[in-house]
Image (cartoon, rainbow, N blue to C red):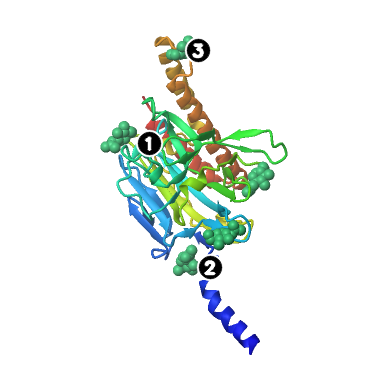
Amino acid sequence: MVLLASLLFRLFLIPSVPVRATTEFTFRGFKGNDSEIRIAGEAAVIKPDGLLRLTNRASNVTGTAFYHKPVRLLETNRKATNATTVRSFSTRFVFVIIPSSSSSGGFGFTFTLSPTPNRPNAGSAQYLGVLNKENNGDPRNHVFAVEFDTVQGSGDDTDRIGNDIGLNFNSRTSDFQEPVVYYQKDDPNKREDFELESGNPIQALLNYDGATQTLNVTVYPAKLGFKPTKPLISRQIPKLLDVVQEEMYVGFTAATGKRDQSSDHYVMGWSFSSVGENPIAATLDLSELPPPPRFDSGFIGRYGHHACVALLLRHVQKATATRRDSGRLGNRSSSQIQIQRSLRRHRWIQGDWDHRNRRVRNGLQRKTRQRRSHRCEEDHSE
Ligand SMILES: *[C@@H]1O[C@H](CO)[C@@H](O)[C@H](O)[C@H]1NC(C)=O
Ligand SMILES: *[C@@H]1O[C@H](CO)[C@@H](O)[C@H](O)[C@H]1NC(C)=O
Ligand SMILES: *[C@@H]1O[C@H](CO)[C@@H](O)[C@H](O)[C@H]1NC(C)=O
Ligand SMILES: *[C@@H]1O[C@H](CO)[C@@H](O)[C@H](O)[C@H]1NC(C)=O
Ligand SMILES: *[C@@H]1O[C@H](CO)[C@@H](O)[C@H](O)[C@H]1NC(C)=O
């Protein structure tokens, strides 16, 4: 009888005990997932492959995509101190950014924790579809964003090219920012820089550990062949506790600026987990994701080949001359930054080409190459 009573008691008790609700999902492409993500603004799932496009290259647009169900990110340790902490979580995504032109593009995208599954009235350009002029910096926003920034200096109106990852708490200004690099596997002190706006798939891994309040951010070219062990960012972020509410939506926001300060922002796949003490978001293998968007216009299409190196150099000479004329020698002018960026991008594409060339050495490909370099010359006959 006592046993039965205790059993009944337990049965009735169970539903009143707060459910340790955790979330886990994996999108390998977004085909057929219209009901699992909430999209707004310019965001769309591109048919037929199922790429998620956050923005196209239109001027001053925003786009958002959030997981349809909120995620429980606060937990109270009732047995011990009653202290509330942010639950550990892990998320991974593969993205592609295609800039509108060789020397520009923008403004970037964010992975965001938000109390709402969209960002109503959020601004374009430097507001990245998260906030706007009026609510920027307001602690009542309860938003945390990891920003992948491709335009720098938006605060000081210089609109320089950026290539940074920042941590933003209720504000478009980052508390902390790092230029984009990954660390080599054999030598963790060796930094390799690369471009967010390369047009190639890039993998990002965000791991937050609730016990140590540490967020790790690792970003690397998806074709690298290994995951760097040393994260780009490893920071304690106790402020996250002030931002996070009982239930939060997780997802992406992106924005473009005026004319050439715009990019296509794509997400090819996305996984998330808050399960267990040390959640690890499911791996995303490129071979399981929809093919990346074609990068066939703008800079790469025109310069993406050996024969175009000469043209690139001419570009560099011209810009150097301009810089000399303007008497700014010795300073990192914006044209200099642009050239460096162009060269970096070119190196990347070159690598891709070399790889392909090694694999297929036949006459047909030679023909294609000739055709391409021909097109390149035509495009640039000045
Ligand atoms: C996305 O849709 C596919 C096909 O309908 C389904 O198998 C998969 O579980 C969905 N993914 C998520 C995260 O809901
Ligand atoms: C935690 O809070 C509850 C309700 O406020 C209280 O009953 C309990 O004694 C607290 N536990 C500890 C360990 O302080
Ligand atoms: C973050 O990175 C540091 C340094 O590599 C590592 O010691 C720590 O375990 C990582 N934490 C998480 C949550 O990944
Ligand atoms: C459009 O973007 C530019 C930056 O490229 C920005 O200066 C401008 O304020 C934006 N316009 C609107 C209406 O948001
Ligand atoms: C670079 O520009 C800054 C500000 O315009 C100036 O103070 C500095 O002296 C310049 N440096 C050189 C090497 O010309």
Report the mark closest to the observer, 2 or 3. Answer: 2
Mark nearer the N terminus (1 vs 2): 2
User: Which of the labelled discs sits on residue 19, or is there none?
Assistant: 2
Residue at 64%, 86% in the rendered image:
2
Mark 2–mark 3 Cα distance, whole angstroms, equals 62 Å
User: Which of the labelled discs sits on residue 330, or is there none?
Assistant: 3
Residue 238 at what x, y percent from top left? Answer: 55, 43
- Specify the quadrant that holds the C terminus: top left
Q: Looking at the picture, does residue 327 appear above or below residue 134?
A: above
Q: Does the closest atom of ligand 5 sit within 8 Å of the Cβ of label 3?
A: yes
Residue at 47%, 35% in the rendered image:
174
Report the mark closest to the observer, 3 or 1. Answer: 1
Q: Are marks 1 and 2 in contact (CB under 8 Å)?
A: no
Horizontal side of residue 190 vs 90, given as left or right: right
Residue 232: image quadrant is top right
Q: Amino acid at mark 1?
A: Gln
Task: Report the residue marked by disc 1.
Answer: 126
Horizontal side of residue 50 vs 217, given as left or right: left
Residue 332 appearing in the image: yes
Residue at 55%, 45% in the rendered image:
363
Q: Amino acid at mark 3?
A: Gly
Q: Does the closest atom of ligand 4 sit within 8 Å of the Cβ of label 1?
A: yes
Mark nearer the N terminus (2 vs 3): 2
Q: Amino acid at mark 2?
A: Val
Say which element carries label 2.
loop
